[in-house]
Image: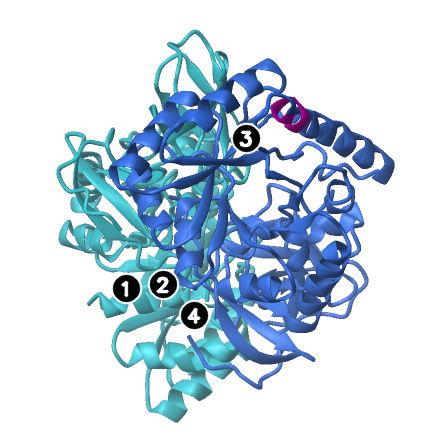
Chain colours: A blue, B cyan
Amino acid sequence: MSNWAGVTTLEIDTPALCLDADALEHNIERMAAFFQQRPAALRPHCKTHKCPTIAWMQLRAGAIGITCAKLGEAEVMAQAGIRDILIANQIVGPKIPRLIGLAAYSDVMVAVDDIANAQDLSAAACAAGATLRVLMEVDAGMDRCGVPPGEPSLALARQLVALPGLRFEGIMGYEGHAVMIPDPAERRAATEKAMGILVGVRDLLQDAGLPVGIVSAGGTGTYDVTGAYPGVTEVQAGSYATMDARYDTVGVGFERALTVVARVISAPREDMVVIDAGLKTMTTEFGLPTLVHPEGWALQSLSEEHGKLRREGGKPLRPGDVVTLVPSHGCTAINLHDAYVVTRDDRVIGEWPIAARGCVR
Amino acid sequence: MSNWAGVTTLEIDTPALCLDADALEHNIERMAAFFQQRPAALRPHCKTHKCPTIAWMQLRAGAIGITCAKLGEAEVMAQAGIRDILIANQIVGPKIPRLIGLAAYSDVMVAVDDIANAQDLSAAACAAGATLRVLMEVDAGMDRCGVPPGEPSLALARQLVALPGLRFEGIMGYEGHAVMIPDPAERRAATEKAMGILVGVRDLLQDAGLPVGIVSAGGTGTYDVTGAYPGVTEVQAGSYATMDARYDTVGVGFERALTVVARVISAPREDMVVIDAGLKTMTTEFGLPTLVHPEGWALQSLSEEHGKLRREGGKPLRPGDVVTLVPSHGCTAINLHDAYVVTRDDRVIGEWPIAARGCVR
């Protein structure tokens, strides 16, 4: 990869995934400040940025540990020196020996919601003479993974506590059905309902004499509600560091740090030009990315290798002209790239490896 | 990455992008056979498979060269020893010196549709003492890149022929608006119309005394029409080697070589389970992937890290159970992965690097 340090974003090769260092630092500091005077702590999710550089910035700002979606991500982060890692999903099958291996060089914690899976983890941990930290995942209303609240949660927790080789640390739940609700009052209501379910399970377990040290939940859209909810001990927000166009619309108040810089490669008509960024540079499951520069043009469509821009009163564009877009979904767009081109005051200060990119296993 | 050679697909870690070697070889041979007795030749597009191993299989089966979408892909293929490479897009800005560099160790050819861009290429080639092969891209009805047919094509071609440092090799056009038309007769009609435009430009240029050695076009959905159209000299089909669910529906007769093997990680209800493959493993711009195993289950939705399966009469699934899906769009799904897990008779025979993955520049 080229050495672009010192050049402006107008000069870099395209398409490039760019990260504004000032906005990133602002976002990390703003989120850290929210948690500074609260009982709950921040355990930022690394599935969005996938970058140990950013994870360490979050830890230095006060985060108590990190969250990962995949074992492979957790391995990358542990190899970058990070110890306290929650894998917020279930680990099954051939991955279990790898997980036990990771537990030998980190304080990894994993989600469980099934007794047979927990028994597999217990057997593997015992065979290795290891202790594996587990959080029981509870379905707090999202209808995806997790044990139902109430009696099933209590029954599974009783079994988990008794399994050798596992240390039952507490519970987690994700209010993923609430994080993107546009209306703040509705979002708050849905989040409080989900946290009521989750903290209700904590109460049920504690009343039965079971230890619940950790109650983990939350995302960028709900951090302020979840992070202030009595009983929640940690919040897993991730997108706040980089942000994206979808979270811009939710109005969570973080700055836009992530952009894609692209170039016009063809200008067949005055009212339509084609750029060098398509579906292998940005994703569309949350809608089209947003064109933010130049004014008077809009992104009309993305195909595999191309984007078509439609003129809406802007000045004519020619091949070679630079345009800037904001990805609609940062998590999946970042996962397409090997490195961030990091800028400050519009000059490149370095390239940071997206070291956990593609770690789907 | 683990060494899985010899294990069955039931035993590999998941999610994994799998490639059936028999189906791949069948597809490569079937396409090669189509071109064996024809004036037109095959120049397979590598933007789909992004894998030098497969590109070399295609060349050994008779392909005259390869097509790439990006300069970075072409560099990977040239470094794997492939010489005759068409970059079927315009190269602008900071990439031009890299392109001239590539021309020093390959017979690279690039698309042009703009005189200012061609002048930039010419100046860079002359400064390096190099000769760069160019194809003029014509808009054959797709309304994306390319110079319009008729007088604008003739005028640009006259200028290109006169530019020092460039060798004008001919023309290209892509009937991308036709390749996915489900009805074969409609697809044929749209393709023949597009090829009529493209070959019409060839005639116009030849009548004016300009040399048009190459007329390049085509995709997997239209190879049989484009490849038999008088005047077309080469076809750029790519998806036929691996195939995907979308091209399955178009009915082009190639075998399904590409699958994603995933595992159930959570089974919260008898009628719904969650797998470990989401939007970072497969893409959805052409719709949801197709679940092909086990019977009696269907893919209901994909989120970032998860897929939800809905029971439709199948046997119950438990955490750890293996499922198989076919990506809806192979090109973008392959681009998420670092390697294919290659199988024959359902046993792993190796892992092939997707060496050009992420080469968006």
Circle 1/circle 3 CB separation < 8 Å: no
| Residue drawn at point x = 26 percent, y = 51 percent | B1
Mark 4, mark 3: which one is toward the viewer? 3
Which label sits on residue B73?
2
Above or below, B159 against A159 in this view is: below
Left or right side of A27 for A174: left
Which residue extends farthest top? B313
Label 4 sits on residue: B208
The residue stretch that appears in magenta: A202-206
What is the distance, in whole Å, between disc 2 and disc 4 at their CAs?
Answer: 35 Å
User: Do circles 1 and 4 both sit on a common chain?
Assistant: yes
Q: Chain of mark 2?
A: B
Above or below, B56 against B224 in this view is: below
Circle 1/circle 4 CB separation < 8 Å: no
| Residue drawn at point x = 38 percent, y = 46 percent | B334
User: Do circles 4 and 3 both sit on a common chain?
Assistant: no
Q: Is residue A204 magenta?
A: yes
User: Do circles 3 and 2 both sit on a common chain?
Assistant: no
Which label sits on residue B77?
1
Disc 1 secondary structure class: helix
Mark 3, mark 2: which one is toward the viewer? 3
What is the distance, in whole Å, between disc 2 and disc 1 at their CAs?
Answer: 6 Å
Label 3 sits on residue: A137
